[in-house]
Image (spheres, rainbow, N blue to C red):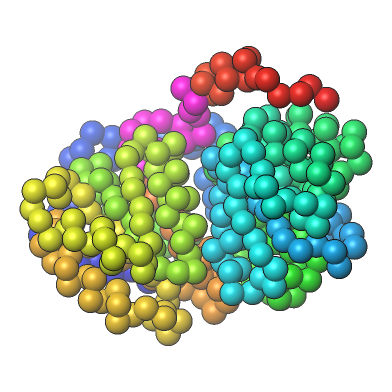
Amino acid sequence: MYQRERKRLSLDMNKLMSFEGSANLDDINYVRDLDRSNMYSYLCSIAKDSLESYKKAKNIFSFPSNDIKNIIGAGMGGSGMAPIALGSLLKDELTIPYALSQDYNIPKYLTSNTLLIAISDSGETEEVISQYYQAKKRGAKIIVIGQGNKLIEIAKKNKILYFTYSTPVPSRASFAFMFGPSLACLENIGVVHADKEDALLESIKVVNELNAEIGINVPTEENIAKKVALLLKIHIPILYVEPPFGSLGPRFTKMLNENARMFAFYNHFPELRHNEIMSWTSTNQKLNFIPILLRDSEKRSKMKREIDEVKKLLRDCSGIIEFRAIGESKIARFYSLLHLTDMIAYYGAILVKKDPSVTPELKQLKSKLRASSILPHS
């Protein structure tokens, strides 16, 4: 499933294991004690939870769809990952325009013929609530997805269809409960292929098989996710993602930022070969970066030749980490890379001795912003 090249970046495990805290990766009790919200179990059940929430939402999001002409997905931060994934994964299936809106304001073209998918894990996201009110004023169709609180209460009051759930982990680990219902909605209104249940079933199998290789019980010497997490203690990752998995770029960077307190950056094929690739041809600004390529499976890739040529221009960097998707369906291949990258970020949190679910600084910032909110209260 994975490849690592350019042995200048040696996986010298004696050196890596000497880093402070590295031995904790294989101390199961230490990991579980640090992970107080049990994020690990949610990462491992991400495909299963997606299928279950998808099935439940199929019975909720049922409404006339003949007059829906376009769709807007609204979500911020971890809650924004589901609408981003919808757009990149289903681009070649969607029969009507789909756009992502991550702002306080909705696009001018939103009308009564628009479907707004408003997602807020906390139910308190100001940008999403603002867009909800504007869309409702224009008479748009709306569905709401979240854990409760303000947005769900508003939806109930306005008799808007909603899907709710409850988890102790933050939005970035609740992807399944936002993506599954969104997928069900698009399938119900007939704008994507009606085969998503089979794809999610395959995703469960793929994630389970992968977790047998990268789970917390697998020692570092045999665990590629733990090894990469160790490498990222001394290298800043630059993620390069092959379509149709572009959403994994922002997903992986956010998981590294929030879980592991690491800097990370991303770009995607084919765009990066028009500009950013030139940065690797100079030794002046390489600093301590390492490229991580997230690629489709060998037989499914439509950009093999292009990516192989780009790799030649990376020959002088510290090293290249390369992962290929596994699975038959596009969604299963997506989940294979999603779970792998999620686990790398999870182990990154353990290495810096942080509970991957807890980000007090972000919580404090959001609390201050809500205190000065100018949004309506009903």
Quadrant of the image containing the C terminus? top right
Residue for point 40% across, 68% down: 242
| Count of number-bearing discs | 0
Quadrant of the image containing the N terminus? bottom left
Where does the image place residue 271, in percent across and percent down from the top left? 35, 64
Above or below, comparing residue 347 to residue 104 in the picture: below
Which residues, given as a range, are shown in magenta? 348-362
Say left or right for 211 vs 282: right
Q: Is residue 170 magenta?
A: no
Picture quadrant where residue 273 is located: bottom left
Front residue (pair 369, 354):
369
Where does the image place residue 270, in percent across and percent down from the top left? 36, 69
Residue for point 36% across, 57% down: 267
Instruction: Report if residue 48 is visible in the image.
Output: no
Where does the image place residue 353, in percent across and percent down from the top left? 36, 31
Front residue (pair 284, 69):
69
Where does the image place residue 286, in percent across and percent down from the top left? 15, 50
